[in-house]
Image: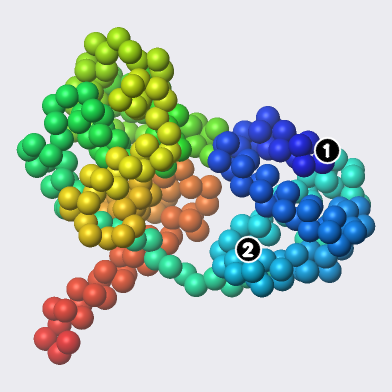
Protein backbone atom coordinates (compact mmCIF):
# COMPACT_ATOMS: atom_id res chain seq x y z
CA UNK A 1 0.00 0.00 0.00
CA UNK A 2 1.36 3.40 -1.02
CA UNK A 3 0.56 5.10 2.27
CA UNK A 4 2.41 2.44 4.27
CA UNK A 5 5.44 2.71 1.98
CA UNK A 6 5.44 6.48 2.36
CA UNK A 7 5.18 6.30 6.17
CA UNK A 8 8.03 3.75 6.29
CA UNK A 9 10.12 6.16 4.22
CA UNK A 10 9.40 8.97 6.69
CA UNK A 11 10.24 6.76 9.66
CA UNK A 12 13.36 4.96 8.47
CA UNK A 13 14.92 7.30 5.92
CA UNK A 14 13.79 10.72 7.11
CA UNK A 15 13.79 9.84 10.84
CA UNK A 16 10.52 11.68 11.46
CA UNK A 17 9.02 11.57 14.94
CA UNK A 18 6.01 9.44 15.85
CA UNK A 19 3.96 12.62 16.21
CA UNK A 20 4.87 13.79 12.68
CA UNK A 21 4.17 10.37 11.14
CA UNK A 22 0.75 10.27 12.82
CA UNK A 23 -0.08 13.66 11.29
CA UNK A 24 1.06 12.50 7.83
CA UNK A 25 -0.97 9.30 8.19
CA UNK A 26 -4.10 11.31 8.92
CA UNK A 27 -3.59 13.93 6.19
CA UNK A 28 -2.65 11.51 3.40
CA UNK A 29 -5.18 8.90 4.48
CA UNK A 30 -7.95 11.48 4.40
CA UNK A 31 -6.88 12.62 0.91
CA UNK A 32 -6.76 9.07 -0.46
CA UNK A 33 -10.23 8.38 0.96
CA UNK A 34 -11.50 11.49 -0.79
CA UNK A 35 -10.02 10.36 -4.11
CA UNK A 36 -11.64 6.95 -3.71
CA UNK A 37 -15.02 8.55 -3.02
CA UNK A 38 -14.64 10.50 -6.29
CA UNK A 39 -13.54 7.36 -8.17
CA UNK A 40 -9.96 8.58 -8.61
CA UNK A 41 -6.58 7.36 -7.38
CA UNK A 42 -3.12 8.97 -7.21
CA UNK A 43 -2.35 7.85 -10.78
CA UNK A 44 -5.38 9.56 -12.28
CA UNK A 45 -5.74 12.55 -9.93
CA UNK A 46 -4.69 15.98 -11.17
CA UNK A 47 -4.44 19.37 -9.52
CA UNK A 48 -8.22 19.65 -10.02
CA UNK A 49 -8.84 16.80 -7.58
CA UNK A 50 -6.32 18.24 -5.11
CA UNK A 51 -8.10 21.60 -5.21
CA UNK A 52 -11.48 19.90 -4.79
CA UNK A 53 -10.17 18.13 -1.70
CA UNK A 54 -8.78 21.36 -0.22
CA UNK A 55 -12.08 23.10 -0.98
CA UNK A 56 -13.85 20.37 0.96
CA UNK A 57 -11.56 20.98 3.94
CA UNK A 58 -12.47 24.68 3.84
CA UNK A 59 -16.19 23.85 3.61
CA UNK A 60 -16.12 21.75 6.78
CA UNK A 61 -14.40 24.54 8.70
CA UNK A 62 -10.67 23.81 8.62
CA UNK A 63 -8.55 26.92 9.23
CA UNK A 64 -5.89 28.11 6.72
CA UNK A 65 -3.02 26.95 8.95
CA UNK A 66 -4.51 23.46 9.16
CA UNK A 67 -5.04 23.35 5.39
CA UNK A 68 -1.46 24.51 4.80
CA UNK A 69 -0.19 21.63 6.94
CA UNK A 70 -2.22 19.30 4.74
CA UNK A 71 -0.77 20.90 1.58
CA UNK A 72 2.72 20.42 2.99
CA UNK A 73 1.96 16.74 3.65
CA UNK A 74 0.64 16.27 0.13
CA UNK A 75 3.71 17.93 -1.37
CA UNK A 76 5.96 15.49 0.50
CA UNK A 77 3.77 12.54 -0.53
CA UNK A 78 3.86 13.45 -4.22
CA UNK A 79 7.62 14.05 -4.13
CA UNK A 80 7.94 10.52 -2.75
CA UNK A 81 5.76 9.11 -5.56
CA UNK A 82 7.95 10.84 -8.16
CA UNK A 83 11.10 9.57 -6.44
CA UNK A 84 9.75 6.00 -6.55
CA UNK A 85 8.83 6.30 -10.23
CA UNK A 86 5.14 5.77 -9.48
CA UNK A 87 4.20 9.12 -11.08
CA UNK A 88 5.74 11.20 -13.82
CA UNK A 89 3.96 14.49 -13.10
CA UNK A 90 3.43 16.37 -9.86
CA UNK A 91 -0.04 17.97 -9.47
CA UNK A 92 1.16 19.85 -6.38
CA UNK A 93 3.28 22.19 -8.51
CA UNK A 94 0.09 24.14 -9.25
CA UNK A 95 -1.04 24.27 -5.61
CA UNK A 96 -0.07 27.28 -3.50
CA UNK A 97 -0.14 27.73 0.25
CA UNK A 98 -2.98 29.82 1.68
CA UNK A 99 -2.28 33.19 3.21
CA UNK A 100 -2.43 33.11 6.99
CA UNK A 101 -2.40 35.89 9.58
CA UNK A 102 0.97 36.34 11.26
CA UNK A 103 0.41 35.70 14.94
CA UNK A 104 3.31 36.69 17.16
CA UNK A 105 4.50 34.00 19.59
CA UNK A 106 3.06 34.43 23.07
CA UNK A 107 5.62 34.83 25.83
CA UNK A 108 5.89 35.18 29.59
CA UNK A 109 8.41 37.73 30.78
CA UNK A 110 11.72 36.10 31.71
CA UNK A 111 11.75 37.89 35.08
CA UNK A 112 8.48 36.17 36.03
CA UNK A 113 9.80 32.71 35.10
CA UNK A 114 13.02 33.32 37.03
CA UNK A 115 10.96 34.42 40.03
CA UNK A 116 8.96 31.18 39.79
CA UNK A 117 12.13 29.09 39.79
CA UNK A 118 13.78 31.02 42.61
CA UNK A 119 10.85 31.41 45.02
CA UNK A 120 11.46 29.15 47.98
CA UNK A 121 8.85 26.49 48.62
CA UNK A 122 7.18 26.45 45.21
CA UNK A 123 8.97 23.22 44.31
CA UNK A 124 9.11 20.55 47.01
CA UNK A 125 12.45 18.93 47.85
CA UNK A 126 11.25 15.42 47.01
CA UNK A 127 11.67 13.55 43.72
CA UNK A 128 8.45 14.82 42.12
CA UNK A 129 9.06 18.44 43.06
CA UNK A 130 12.64 18.49 41.78
CA UNK A 131 11.61 16.72 38.59
CA UNK A 132 9.00 19.39 37.91
CA UNK A 133 11.63 22.05 38.56
CA UNK A 134 14.00 20.38 36.07
CA UNK A 135 11.24 20.35 33.44
CA UNK A 136 10.64 24.11 33.76
CA UNK A 137 14.34 24.94 34.11
CA UNK A 138 15.36 22.84 31.11
CA UNK A 139 12.67 24.14 28.77
CA UNK A 140 13.35 27.75 29.74
CA UNK A 141 17.15 27.64 29.99
CA UNK A 142 17.76 25.81 26.72
CA UNK A 143 14.68 26.61 24.63
CA UNK A 144 14.32 22.96 23.60
CA UNK A 145 11.05 21.53 22.31
CA UNK A 146 8.79 19.29 24.39
CA UNK A 147 9.55 16.30 22.14
CA UNK A 148 13.29 16.94 22.52
CA UNK A 149 12.96 17.00 26.29
CA UNK A 150 11.23 13.61 26.24
CA UNK A 151 14.16 12.05 24.37
CA UNK A 152 16.95 13.25 26.69
CA UNK A 153 18.65 10.37 28.53
CA UNK A 154 20.77 10.69 31.66
CA UNK A 155 23.94 10.01 29.64
CA UNK A 156 23.20 12.94 27.30
CA UNK A 157 24.11 15.36 30.10
CA UNK A 158 27.78 16.36 30.21
CA UNK A 159 28.43 18.07 33.53
CA UNK A 160 32.13 18.47 32.80
CA UNK A 161 31.55 20.56 29.68
CA UNK A 162 28.21 22.03 30.85
CA UNK A 163 26.34 20.80 27.77
CA UNK A 164 23.38 18.59 26.86
CA UNK A 165 23.04 16.50 23.72
CA UNK A 166 19.69 17.09 22.03
CA UNK A 167 18.06 15.12 19.23
CA UNK A 168 15.80 17.44 17.24
CA UNK A 169 13.54 17.06 14.25
CA UNK A 170 14.69 14.32 11.89
CA UNK A 171 16.95 13.03 14.71
CA UNK A 172 19.37 15.87 14.00
CA UNK A 173 21.82 16.11 16.87
CA UNK A 174 22.92 19.38 18.44
CA UNK A 175 24.72 20.35 21.61
CA UNK A 176 23.22 23.05 23.83
CA UNK A 177 24.94 24.77 26.76
CA UNK A 178 23.50 24.67 30.24
CA UNK A 179 23.69 27.35 32.89
CA UNK A 180 25.25 26.79 36.30
CA UNK A 181 21.78 26.95 37.84
CA UNK A 182 20.47 24.24 35.51
CA UNK A 183 23.52 22.09 36.22
CA UNK A 184 22.93 22.24 40.00
CA UNK A 185 19.23 21.56 39.48
CA UNK A 186 19.97 18.48 37.35
CA UNK A 187 22.53 17.10 39.83
CA UNK A 188 20.03 17.41 42.68
CA UNK A 189 17.32 15.67 40.66
CA UNK A 190 19.58 12.85 39.45
CA UNK A 191 20.67 12.13 43.02
CA UNK A 192 17.03 11.71 44.03
CA UNK A 193 16.35 9.63 40.92
CA UNK A 194 19.29 7.33 41.61
CA UNK A 195 17.85 6.07 44.91
CA UNK A 196 14.45 5.31 43.37
CA UNK A 197 14.35 1.55 42.87
CA UNK A 198 11.19 1.65 40.74
CA UNK A 199 12.72 3.60 37.82
CA UNK A 200 12.27 1.52 34.66
CA UNK A 201 13.39 4.09 32.11
CA UNK A 202 16.74 5.48 30.98
CA UNK A 203 15.06 8.74 30.02
CA UNK A 204 15.86 11.82 32.09
CA UNK A 205 12.24 12.74 32.84
CA UNK A 206 10.08 9.96 34.24
CA UNK A 207 6.64 9.74 35.83
CA UNK A 208 5.93 9.26 39.52
CA UNK A 209 5.89 5.50 38.82
CA UNK A 210 9.24 5.56 36.99
CA UNK A 211 7.90 5.14 33.44
CA UNK A 212 8.72 7.21 30.35
CA UNK A 213 7.06 10.61 30.52
CA UNK A 214 4.57 11.46 27.78
CA UNK A 215 3.95 14.75 26.02
CA UNK A 216 0.71 15.20 27.98
CA UNK A 217 2.57 14.56 31.26
CA UNK A 218 5.04 17.37 30.46
CA UNK A 219 2.19 19.63 29.35
CA UNK A 220 0.39 19.15 32.67
CA UNK A 221 3.51 19.96 34.68
CA UNK A 222 4.17 23.16 32.72
CA UNK A 223 0.55 24.31 32.74
CA UNK A 224 0.19 23.75 36.48
CA UNK A 225 3.48 25.42 37.39
CA UNK A 226 3.09 28.43 35.11
CA UNK A 227 -0.39 29.09 36.53
CA UNK A 228 1.42 30.52 39.58
CA UNK A 229 2.86 33.40 37.54
CA UNK A 230 0.56 33.73 34.52
CA UNK A 231 -3.16 33.98 33.91
CA UNK A 232 -2.68 33.38 30.18
CA UNK A 233 -4.92 30.68 28.75
CA UNK A 234 -2.00 29.35 26.76
CA UNK A 235 0.67 28.00 29.12
CA UNK A 236 2.16 25.25 26.97
CA UNK A 237 5.81 24.08 27.05
CA UNK A 238 6.36 25.99 23.79
CA UNK A 239 5.69 29.31 25.52
CA UNK A 240 8.93 28.78 27.49
CA UNK A 241 10.80 28.30 24.20
CA UNK A 242 9.33 31.54 22.86
CA UNK A 243 10.08 33.35 26.11
CA UNK A 244 13.78 32.50 26.28
CA UNK A 245 14.29 33.21 22.57
CA UNK A 246 12.73 36.67 22.96
CA UNK A 247 14.72 37.35 26.16
CA UNK A 248 18.01 36.35 24.49
CA UNK A 249 17.31 38.64 21.55
CA UNK A 250 16.42 41.58 23.81
CA UNK A 251 19.64 41.03 25.76
CA UNK A 252 21.81 41.26 22.65
CA UNK A 253 22.15 37.69 21.38
CA UNK A 254 22.61 37.35 17.61
CA UNK A 255 19.86 35.76 15.52
CA UNK A 256 22.23 33.11 14.16
CA UNK A 257 23.21 32.05 17.67
CA UNK A 258 19.55 31.80 18.73
CA UNK A 259 18.85 29.79 15.57
CA UNK A 260 21.55 27.27 16.51
CA UNK A 261 20.33 27.04 20.11
CA UNK A 262 16.72 26.41 19.08
CA UNK A 263 17.62 24.00 16.28
CA UNK A 264 15.80 25.95 13.57
CA UNK A 265 16.42 24.78 10.01
CA UNK A 266 16.38 28.33 8.65
CA UNK A 267 16.84 31.85 9.95
CA UNK A 268 13.32 32.74 8.82
CA UNK A 269 11.89 30.71 11.72
CA UNK A 270 14.02 32.65 14.21
CA UNK A 271 13.24 36.09 12.79
CA UNK A 272 9.70 36.00 14.19
CA UNK A 273 11.20 36.89 17.58
CA UNK A 274 12.43 40.22 16.22
CA UNK A 275 8.77 41.15 15.71
CA UNK A 276 8.06 40.27 19.35
CA UNK A 277 10.82 42.61 20.50
CA UNK A 278 9.64 45.44 18.24
CA UNK A 279 6.03 45.08 19.42
CA UNK A 280 7.18 45.21 23.06
CA UNK A 281 9.28 48.30 22.34
CA UNK A 282 6.28 49.97 20.68
CA UNK A 283 4.13 49.18 23.71
CA UNK A 284 6.70 50.60 26.14
CA UNK A 285 7.15 53.67 23.92
CA UNK A 286 3.40 54.30 23.83
CA UNK A 287 3.07 54.03 27.62
CA UNK A 288 6.16 56.07 28.49
CA UNK A 289 6.20 58.80 25.85
CA UNK A 290 4.99 62.13 27.26
CA UNK A 291 2.80 62.73 24.19
CA UNK A 292 1.30 59.24 24.39
Q: Reply above or below: 175 against 211.
A: below
The answer to whether any part of residue 118 appears in the image is: yes
Give the residue drawn at x 27%, y 17%.
193
Give the residue drawn at x 66%, y 48%.
26
Q: Provide the residue designation for mark 1.
A: 1
The answer to whether any part of residue 250 appears in the image is: no
Residue 226 placement, left or right of 13: left
Label 1 neighbourhood size at 10 Å, few (<14), some (14-19), many (20+)?
Answer: few
Q: Provide the residue designation for mark 2.
A: 67
Counting every numbered tag in the picture gives 2
Q: At numbered mark 2, what does the secondary structure look like: helix, strand or loop?
A: helix
Give the residue drawn at x 60%, y 69%.
61
Residue 99, given in percent of the width and then of the height, sits at 59, 72
Query: Which callout, 2 or 1, points at the residue further toward the start of the chain?
Result: 1
Label 2 neighbourhood size at 10 Å, few (<14), some (14-19), many (20+)?
Answer: some
Q: Reply above or below: 110 against 210.
A: below
Q: Based on the displayed image, in which of its 4 quarters is residue 5 positioned?
A: top right
The C terminus lies in quadrant: bottom left
Q: Reply above or below: 69 against 64.
A: above
The N terminus lies in quadrant: top right
Amino acid sequence: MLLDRFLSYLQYEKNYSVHSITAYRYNIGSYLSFLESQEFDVNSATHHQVRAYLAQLMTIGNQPRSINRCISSLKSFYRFLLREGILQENPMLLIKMLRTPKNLPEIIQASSIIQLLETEGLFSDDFEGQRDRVVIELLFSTGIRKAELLHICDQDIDFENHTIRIFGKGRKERIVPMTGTLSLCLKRYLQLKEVKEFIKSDKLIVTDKGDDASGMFIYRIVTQRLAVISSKQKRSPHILRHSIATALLENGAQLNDIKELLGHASLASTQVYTHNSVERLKSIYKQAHPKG
